[in-house]
């Protein structure tokens, strides 16, 4: 019974941390510009606002008619826990995605160009034209295959800049309503001002219920929420409120931010205890393009990482690094190029066949070419060699 209770508390702690993180990030557009409460609360959200407003200003785009994006993803894993053969398979993969989207006409094309050890993998294009979906398999089949006659992107569910701003404003008001002055405190540590929000068994249910109560009475928020969701907001709040009744034995969660004398955000930290172990997650912020991460377990640094982004014109290079006490390292690199309102050219689907009209000969030919794909053959051989080696041991 006690073990079940601990698992429930752990689950709920994670839910609360996730909820607070999501709220704070969205809150960054407008938070605290008009808050006139005590200094700790005001400074807490002012620092968050300063950071995320900078992010929002970089990412915010005018409502667009066309979008074009090119993304290349590579990984590099080095681990004592993962056999070298598996690491090699992952490290030899290179993925490239391209998306062209005509928002006005609700047409798009998504292409995949991937390689394994410099050999082509299964590549192709997925195209939505006039509410019809087509698939083209490079080097596999010479015609476009009509997959579905009703699948498309629902542009009515896409959020506009006005929608984002409305959501942020309503979340601002909800958080200001739910987070009372008494939940915050201020300290000065090593020339940094530290502002801490404490969420515990005494106030966690109150915070969540107050926040949801406010949003339930916001018709504008609900309208935008249900625009992109398949569920009613009232159904979501009922489920969350039911879960909050079990928060009576949760360990405190501390959310703190530290700023310099100019109120620039330098650090965000989250602290709690899970199964009697003290967990602390710290983000050191040089600027929005350079963030370091450290996760502590009982004051021992277990995980470290970094997020670095370089931007030049429309080109971005994102490098994410993660390390676990020298026993595991992972690097993810994403190179992207995005453009708005440029002229795009979508495929002309003139020679197509309905998937239901493919003959047995067509299917046999498709399967044969798939299994003879050089990149896939190499992956299968690598897995078979790895499996046979383990069976011999």
Image: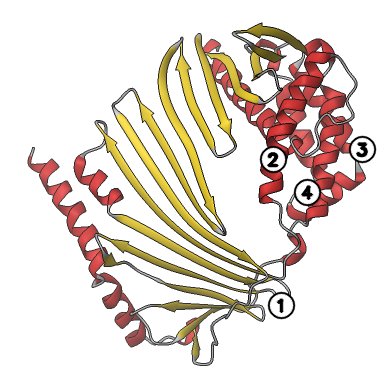
Give coordinates of residue 17: x percent, y percent. Answer: 63, 26
Q: Is residue 2 left or right of residue 375?
A: right
Tell me the distance, in whole angstroms, between the alpha carbons under discs 4 and 3: 18 Å
Which is more N-terminal, label 3 or label 4? 4
* Marks 1 & 2, CB-CB < 8 Å contact: no
Give coordinates of residue 144: x percent, y percent. Answer: 47, 84
The foreground one among 169 and 275 is 169
Q: Residues within 10 Å of mark 2 (few under 14, many from 20)?
A: some
* Marks 4 & 3, CB-CB < 8 Å contact: no
Mark whose residue sits in front, 1 or 3: 1
* Marks 1 & 3, CB-CB < 8 Å contact: no
The foreground one among 314 and 219 is 314
Q: Is residue 158 left or right of residue 354?
A: right
Q: Give the residue number, with chain letter if any, for mark 1.
A: 105
Q: Which mark is residue 54?
A: 2
Tell me the distance, in whole angstroms, between the alpha carbons under discs 1 and 3: 35 Å
Q: Which mark is residue 164?
A: 4
Q: Secondary structure at mark 2?
A: helix
Give coordinates of residue 149: x percent, y percent. Answer: 62, 79
Q: Which mark is residue 149?
A: none
Q: Secondary structure at mark 1?
A: loop
């Amino acid at each position: 019974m006690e073990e079940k209770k601990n698992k429930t508390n752990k689950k709920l702690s994670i839910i609360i941390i996730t909820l607070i993180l999501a709220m704070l990030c969205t809150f960054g557009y407008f938070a605290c510009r008009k808050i006139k409460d005590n200094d700790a609360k005001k400074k807490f959200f002012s620092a968050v606002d300063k950071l995320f407003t900078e992010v929002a200003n970089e990412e915010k785009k005018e409502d667009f008619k066309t979008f074009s994006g090119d993304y290349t993803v590579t990984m590099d894993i080095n681990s004592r826990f993962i056999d070298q053969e598996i690491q090699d398979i992952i490290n030899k993969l290179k993925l490239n995605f391209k998306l062209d989207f005509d928002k006005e006409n609700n047409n798009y094309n998504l292409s995949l160009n991937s390689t394994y050890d410099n050999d082509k993998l299964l590549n192709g294009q997925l195209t939505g034209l006039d509410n019809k979906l087509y698939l083209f398999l490079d080097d596999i089949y010479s015609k476009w295959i009509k997959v579905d006659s009703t699948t498309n992107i629902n542009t009515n569910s896409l959020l506009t800049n006005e929608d984002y701003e409305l959501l942020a404003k309503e979340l601002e008001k909800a958080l200001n309503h739910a987070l009372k002055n008494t939940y915050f405190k201020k300290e000065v540590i090593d020339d940094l001002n530290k502002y801490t929000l404490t969420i515990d068994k005494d106030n966690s249910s109150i915070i969540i219920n107050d926040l949801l109560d406010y949003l339930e009475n916001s018709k504008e928020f609900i309208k935008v929420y249900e625009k992109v969701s398949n569920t009613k907001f009232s159904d979501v709040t009922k489920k969350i409120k039911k879960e909050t009744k079990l928060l009576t034995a949760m360990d405190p969660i501390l959310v703190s931010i530290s700023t310099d004398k100019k109120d620039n955000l330098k650090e965000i930290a989250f602290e709690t205890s899970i199964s009697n172990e003290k967990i602390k997650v710290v983000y050191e912020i040089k600027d929005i393009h350079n963030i370091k991460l450290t996760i502590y377990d009982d004051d021992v640094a277990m995980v470290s990482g970094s997020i670095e982004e370089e931007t030049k014109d429309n080109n971005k290079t994102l490098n994410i690094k993660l390390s676990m006490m020298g026993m595991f390292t992972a690097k993810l690199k994403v190179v992207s190029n995005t453009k708005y309102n440029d002229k795009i050219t979508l495929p002309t689907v003139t020679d197509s066949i309905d998937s239901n009209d493919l003959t047995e000969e067509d299917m046999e030919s498709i399967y044969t070419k798939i299994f003879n794909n050089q990149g896939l053959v190499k992956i299968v051989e690598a897995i078979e060699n790895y499996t046979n080696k383990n069976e011999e041991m």
